[in-house]
Amino acid sequence: MTPPALILRAVALEYGVRVPDILGRDRHRTIMTARRAVAYLLRADGRSYPEIGIELCQADHTSAIHACRMMFERLKKHGETRRTVTRILIRLELLRHGQRFAAPAVPA
């Protein structure tokens, strides 16, 4: 299994937020989306809902269930969400091997 701190770091880098923001109570849209992505990736990595709730500093596992369901629905409907999760997975693989990942520049 991937260490949760690595998943948090990869998601924070992709969404341009700080790890403490993901673990906090802020409900800004970008932070909520990042938090849901972390929950989804932790679940895909084999974590139980109670474990995800603990990692995300949430009161109980039902928040983790909701976050995973929301992300799953977004993945089904939004290509941009699928591309973002794919970039996070690539970033995670590079982080596992100690390499840095910079998003490719967008041509002007």
Image (cartoon, rainbow, N blue to C red):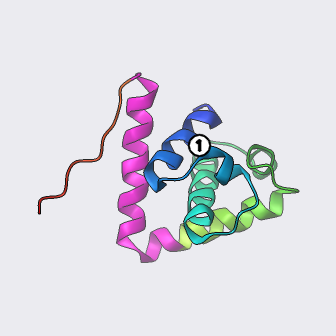
- Name the dominant secondary structure of the magenta segment: helix
Given the image, on which type of amino acid does mark 1 rest? Leu
Is residue 90 toward the left or the right of residue 51 in the image? left
Q: Which image quadrant for residue 91?
A: top left
Q: Residue at x 42, y 44 (%)?
A: 89
Q: Position of residue 26 (x, y in %)?
A: 71, 63
Q: Position of residue 53 (x, y in %)?
A: 79, 51
Q: Position of residue 12 (x, y in %)?
A: 53, 48
| Residue in front for this viewpoint, 5 or 78 | 5
Is residue 73 toward the left or the right of residue 67 in the image? left
Q: Residue at x 43, y 30 (%)?
A: 95
Query: Which of the image's four quarters has the N terminus?
Result: top right
| Residue in front for this viewpoint, 57 or 62 | 57
Q: Residue at x 41, y 22 (%)?
A: 98
| Residue in front for this viewpoint, 18 or 77 | 18
The range drawn in magenta is 74-98
Query: Which of the image's four quarters has the C terminus?
Result: bottom left
Q: What residue is pinned by disc 1?
A: 8
Q: Residue furthest bottom?
A: 77
Q: Residue furthest left?
A: 108
